[in-house]
Amino acid sequence: MPARLPVVLSPTRSEDRNTCGRKHVLKNILDRHKYRSPSADFGTVMHSGANHWWHGIVAEADPHKLLIEATEIVEAKWDELRPTGDKHSKDMAVRLMQYYPQMRFAGIMPGEWHVAQYNGQPMIEQRIELQVGTHILSFQVDRACENDADDIAMIDLKTAARINAYWHRQWELSPQMKLYRLGLKQIFPEARRITLLVEGIEKNIPFKFDYHTCPEWSSEQLEEISMQWQRLAERDAVLLELCTQQKGTIDLSLVAHYALNGFTDFDNKRCWDYGMECEYLDLCKADVEHRVGLLHSDYDVIPVEGY
Ligand code: SF4
């Protein structure tokens, strides 16, 4: 019997799964990586400050004091993660945090809005897990607001190198955004209207921000993305079942073996994503028989079993 099925898969991870299955298994199931994306780390730094800011706003804290605290949190997170490369700096993170409270979606969503509650908690940086088919869709809500007319707005904070026409165009077909909408419809079945806003901050001084309002995809379009997501989750389920031992735990060495020997699909279109080399390139370049050994020697220790 499988150890931990149904599979739990987030929208971001399902996009990894859909593009390079090998990268997904190594990164998201085996969690073996020695390299983190500087952009993702920078996003995490900013999220930590925004999270504190919005919790304080809900608690009606003094905004001046709150901003000082949020900035200290951003600095501490920066020191912890230290995003590499020359595109980001601690000074940029601090200045961006101080700029952040200027952002309001009032121009786009008129009227009075307050942070929505879910499971008795303000919906700020909340992780949600929902059953979709036989697997679990897991996603993080950065912030959800509601008004007195039972409208819900979910705001997804993204830092970006450029906020331009391309940035706006990418959301219309975004599987991640469609899955968010699918999940929100389950969480807020009574909502009159659910709006998904992508809150983009450009990481260039002087900063600028913009909002993108996602389309109201039809039920059929959401069903389509749901079926695609379930097929992707099913691939994880097949792999994990194959590696399940009699006592019910997963043999992670076997998962590594299947990820690296052609059983798991891979796609070399992701090897230089955003101009950065995939952290597993050395593994993929190596001859098949050497890959598992390389994974063990260069990518931390793989526990024998787990999941
Ligand atoms: S190097 Fe390319 S093929 Fe190998 S895991 Fe990374 S993206 Fe996939």
Image: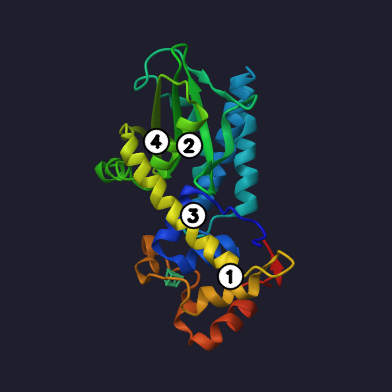
Q: Which mark is residue 183?
A: 2
Image quadrant, ligand 1 = bottom left
Q: Secondary structure at mark 1?
A: helix
- Residue to which mark 4 is pinned: 198
Q: Residues within 10 Å of mark 3 (few under 14, many from 20)?
A: many
Q: Secondary structure at mark 2?
A: helix
Question: What is the spatial separation of the Cα atoms under label 1 and label 2, in whole angstroms?
Answer: 29 Å
Q: Residue 158: image x %, image y %?
A: 44, 41
Q: Residues within 10 Å of mark 1 (few under 14, many from 20)?
A: some
Q: Which one is nearer the viewer's eye here, 15 or 281? A: 15
Question: What is the spatial separation of the Cα atoms under label 3 and label 1, in whole angstroms?
Answer: 20 Å
Q: Secondary structure at mark 3?
A: helix
Please identify the quarter of the rendering in which residue 110 is found.
top left
The residue sitting at 38% across, 37% down in the picture is 206
Kind of residue sitting beneath label 1:
Leu
Q: Is mark 3 within 8 Å of ligand 1?
A: no
Question: What is the spatial separation of the Cα atoms under label 4 and label 2, in whole angstroms?
Answer: 16 Å
Please identify the quarter of the rendering in which residue 122 is found.
top right
Image quadrant where one finds the C terminus: bottom right
Q: Residue 134: image x %, image y %?
A: 53, 49
Which tag is nearer the camera, tag 3 or tag 1? Answer: 1
Please identify the quarter of the rendering in which residue 115 is found.
top right
Which tag is nearer the camera, tag 4 or tag 1? Answer: 1
The residue sitting at 45% across, 31% down in the picture is 185
In the rendered structure, the answer to whether residue 5 lies left or right of residue 21 reads right
Q: Which one is nearer the viewer's eye here, 129 or 245? A: 245
- Residue to which mark 1 is pinned: 242
Closer to the N terminus: mark 3 or mark 1?
3
- Residue to which mark 3 is pinned: 13
Q: Secondary structure at mark 4?
A: strand
Q: Is mark 2 within 8 Å of ligand 1?
A: no
Q: Residues within 10 Å of mark 2 (few under 14, many from 20)?
A: many
